[in-house]
Image: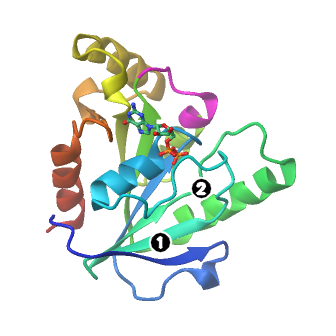
Amino acid sequence: IVVKKAEYTASAVKYEQYPTDGLPEIAMAGRSNVGKSSLINSFLGRRNLARTGNTPGKTQTLNFYRVNDAWFLVDLPGYGYAKVAKTVNAQWGPMMENYLKKREQLRAVIQIVDIRHAPSVEDREMHEWLRVKQVPTMVVATKADKIARGQWLKHLKVIAKDLEIPDVSLILPFSSQSGVGKKELNEAIEEILGI
Ligand code: GDP
């Protein structure tokens, strides 16, 4: 995909606020501060379309970005930030569940984890939930620039084991900083969209 056009179109909490264009969607999920906004900006080739470095957990809406007028990249709210008020957390679950369960045009979820760390409880719960709901899911391990390339496999193996992913090669090492994995992510998205 060559991203020629990328525009923020909507923030939504309720189903009625989702775009009605009917275009296919790919959603991005990950815990707060994992590097999701950076990945989105890097993928879209825009410096600050998705806001980075926000107070983690603050963006409690689904954000829709229309790409090339052909599909939507959906930024799901970051999960698992302890300082988020309980009421916000209580809203978060149903909001995510509503979207992930009901959205017919959802083609896949890209779940972003930190290559340096073993998946959190929330990472594992999210992954398991997506599996149970049979939502096609791809795991991207970001911040790969933060560890030596020779260490990647060791870290990817931990992630694969904890998320019960059968083959380590299904996890894509990525870095918004160095651009590693960007081409592969682009190709994976092309495949998901069938373009
Ligand atoms: P989000 O909360 O998941 O959207 O995370 P952000 O994209 O805002 O990133 C959180 C922090 O991690 C910021 O300080 C980013 O600069 C940093 N960060 C994100 N991606 C990378 C990466 O690939 N490499 C490095 N070194 N830092 C990153």
Left-right relation of 82 to 112: right
- State the residue at coordinates (59%, 55%): 77
Amino acid at dot 2: Pro
Residue 1's disc is none
Q: Residues within 10 Å of mark 2 (few under 14, many from 20)?
A: many
Q: How many callouts does the rendering have?
A: 2
Amino acid at dot 1: Phe
Q: Residues within 10 Å of mark 1 (few under 14, many from 20)?
A: many
Q: Is residue 181 above or below residue 20?
A: above
Label 1 belongs to which residue?
64
- State the residue at coordinates (23%, 17%): 149
Q: Give the magenta range.
A: 116-124
Q: Quadrant of the N terminus?
A: bottom left
Q: Position of residue 122 (x, y in %)?
A: 62, 36
Label 2 belongs to which residue?
77
Q: Is residue 157 above or below residue 86?
A: above
* Whether residue 136 can be seen here: no
